Image: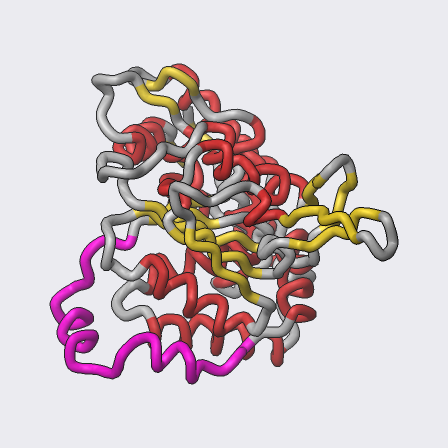
């Protein structure tokens, strides 16, 4: 299916409303620069991490141990200047260890709620797939609704609320695959991969990343993040761009090797991410190349592939190539 792009004149007409105030733009650029200094050779992954934050989504980082998943999460938290909690997921972790618990107070003869680490603005769920499914699912309501319910009482989480989860490949021992419903709550899934030779050499010869992160300066405030999210909502997506996203959704449902294609919610996630990506590049309109740059990160983990179809990332790439843009 061929989809036309917006005309240059139309792009110019909508570019002004979404532009950021100068100081906020400088702070955003400085934040990305700092994280790139802390996480070497991963500029694409750093940019996409900021996309997830600004699009009000959550981020899943999947890769082998030792490739910098936790370092990226810590670098983001240190740079954002937001309240931060880390939970190490293990086989004996209970749901109450994440969301909190109500404890009876004999003095008042009532139950008092003791909030868990999920009551923060940035939550690092480290090695999330080492915990059993019941504990993994304790995050589901928090990620989807920005609230948790304990003993019948609903407690709102602070805003912004941003989950960065790391996981090891599911073929490693002691891991539990995340169910599809949990995967769908992550706006993006990233893989870091091995660093390039120059980045690896600098990493080996330089200071410990933990020391650098501890000395990092917060570059953004809570108010900055909320303002950036508001700006993302004003980035323009033309009718032609929306047609393109819809064509990708439709192709995913008929593509060979795909058992379950992308839902409308996946399309909304892709549009939100594309708006944030455009804003990071200094534009107030979305282009097809923004969608293309994000498609695999947003879509691959939402595809359910046939057993013989290969990886979900390869399927996402094939779907993208099957939908043309004029």
User: Looking at the picture, how far across and down is residue 218, in whole percent?
Assistant: 53, 78
The answer to whether residue 133 is left or right of residue 194 is right
Q: Nearer the viewer, residue 103 or 182?
A: 103
Q: Nearer the viewer, residue 240 or 179?
A: 179
Q: Is residue 213 magenta?
A: yes
Q: Quadrant of residue 271?
A: top right
Q: Quadrant of residue 143?
A: top right
Q: Quadrant of the C terminus?
A: top left
Q: Identify the residue at image location x=67%, y=41%.
A: 145
Which residue is situated farthest in the right direction here?
A: 108
Extent of the magenta region: 192-219
Residue 79 appears in the figure = yes
User: Looking at the picture, how far across and down is residue 177, in whole percent?
Assistant: 36, 32
- Residue 153, above or below 204: above
- Residue 187, above or below 314: below
- Residue 179, above or below 64: above
């Amino acid at each position: 299916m061929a989809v036309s792009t917006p005309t240059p004149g139309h792009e110019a007409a909508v570019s002004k409303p979404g532009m950021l105030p100068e100081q906020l733009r400088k702070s955003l650029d400085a934040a990305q620069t700092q994280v790139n200094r802390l996480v070497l050779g991963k500029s694409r992954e750093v940019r996409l991490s900021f996309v997830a934050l600004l699009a009000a989504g959550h981020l899943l980082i999947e890769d082998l141990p030792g490739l910098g998943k936790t370092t990226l999460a810590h670098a983001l938290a240190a740079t954002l200047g937001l309240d931060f909690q880390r939970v190490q997921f293990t086989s004996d972790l209970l749901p109450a260890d994440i969301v909190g618990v109500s404890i009876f107070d004999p003095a008042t003869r009532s139950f008092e709620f003791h909030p868990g680490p999920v009551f923060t603005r940035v939550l690092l769920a480290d090695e999330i797939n080492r915990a059993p499914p019941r504990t993994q699912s304790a995050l589901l309501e928090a990620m989807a609704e920005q609230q948790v319910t304990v003993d019948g009482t609903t407690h709102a989480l602070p805003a912004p609320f941003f989950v960065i989860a790391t996981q090891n490949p599911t073929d490693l021992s002691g891991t539990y695959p995340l169910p599809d419903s949990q995967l769908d709550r992550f706006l993006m899934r990233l893989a870091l991969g091995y660093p390039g030779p120059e980045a690896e050499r600098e990493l080996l010869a330089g200071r410990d990343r933990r020391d650098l992160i501890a000395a990092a300066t917060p570059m953004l405030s809570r108010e900055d993040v909320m303002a950036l999210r508001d700006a993302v909502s004003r980035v323009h997506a033309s009718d032609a761009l929306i047609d393109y996203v819809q064509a990708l959704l439709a192709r995913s449902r008929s593509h060979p090797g795909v058992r379950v294609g992308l839902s409308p919610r996946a399309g909304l996630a892709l549009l939100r991410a594309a708006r944030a990506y455009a804003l990071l590049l200094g534009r107030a309109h979305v282009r097809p190349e923004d969608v293309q740059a994000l498609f695999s990160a947003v879509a691959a983990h939402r595809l359910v592939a046939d057993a013989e179809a290969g990886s979900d990332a390869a399927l996402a790439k094939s779907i993208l190539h099957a939908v043309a843009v004029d």
